[in-house]
Image: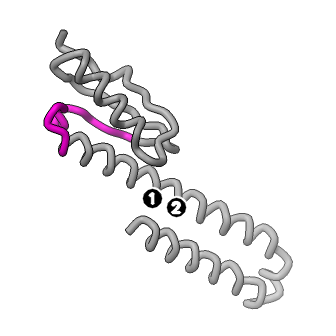
């Protein structure tokens, strides 16, 4: 689903950006800036979709793992960096959560400063 939305968003923005230079003389003068703005918009959309996908994948993996308290771990992602917070029962569970998050495709780093252990 991520890929189809990303492809659709890229196609829509690209089509709009490519048609702007032909719309009027005013757009023709700034077409270089328009293309840069369109490219930047596509990149931001891809990052948002990617971060949302990563967060969903990490959370669902936590919930599927019987050794993790998936409901007690909050997951947030920003530019591929996953931030974990909440309270788990043991240090081993905390380490498992970190390792699990790191194993997800697209995760560039994991910050677990906010994930505390009851031990």
Q: Which residue is drawn at 19% across and 39% down?
A: 65
Residue 81 located left or right of residue 116: right
Image quadrant containing the C terminus: top left
Q: Residues within 10 Å of mark 2 (few under 14, many from 20)?
A: some
| Nearest the eye: 27 or 5 | 5
Q: Quadrant of residue 88?
A: top left
Work out whether 45 lies above or below 114: below
The residue beneath circle 2 is 45
* Magenta-colored span: 64-76
Secondary structure found at label 2: helix
The reply to whether callout 1 and callout 2 are in contact (CB within 8 Å) is: yes
Name the residue located 19 percent from the left edge and 17 percent from the top edge. Answer: 90
Q: Observer-nearest residue: 2 or 37?
A: 2
Q: In which quarter of the image is residue 20?
A: bottom right
Residue 8: x %, y % from top left: 50, 77
Relative to 28, is 77 above or below?
Answer: above
99 vs 18, nearest the viewer: 99
Q: Residue 39 in the image: state x and y as whole percent.
A: 67, 65
Image coordinates of residue 98 in percent, x first then y, are 35, 29
Q: Quadrant where the N terminus lies? A: bottom left
Question: Mark 1 — residue?
Answer: 49
Asked whether, in this view, residue 98 is left or right of residue 43, the answer is left
Judging from the image, what secondary structure is the residue with disc 1 in? helix
**For this view, does 43 lie left or right of residue 83?**
right
- 114 in the magenta segment: no
Farthest residue in the right direction?
29
- Left or right of 115? Residue 66 is left
Q: Nearest the camera: 27 or 80? A: 80
């Amino acid at each position: 689903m991520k890929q189809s939305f990303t492809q659709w968003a890229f196609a829509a923005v690209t089509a709009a950006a490519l048609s702007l230079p032909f719309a009027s003389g005013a757009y023709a003068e700034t077409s270089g800036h328009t293309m840069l703005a369109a490219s930047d918009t596509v990149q931001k959309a891809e990052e948002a979709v990617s971060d949302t996908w990563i967060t969903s994948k990490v959370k669902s993996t936590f919930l599927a793992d019987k050794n993790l308290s998936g409901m007690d771990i909050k997951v947030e992602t920003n530019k591929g960096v996953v931030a974990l917070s909440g309270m788990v029962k043991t240090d081993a569970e905390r380490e498992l959560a970190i390792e699990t998050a790191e194993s997800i495709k697209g995760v560039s780093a994991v910050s677990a400063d906010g994930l505390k252990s009851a031990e």
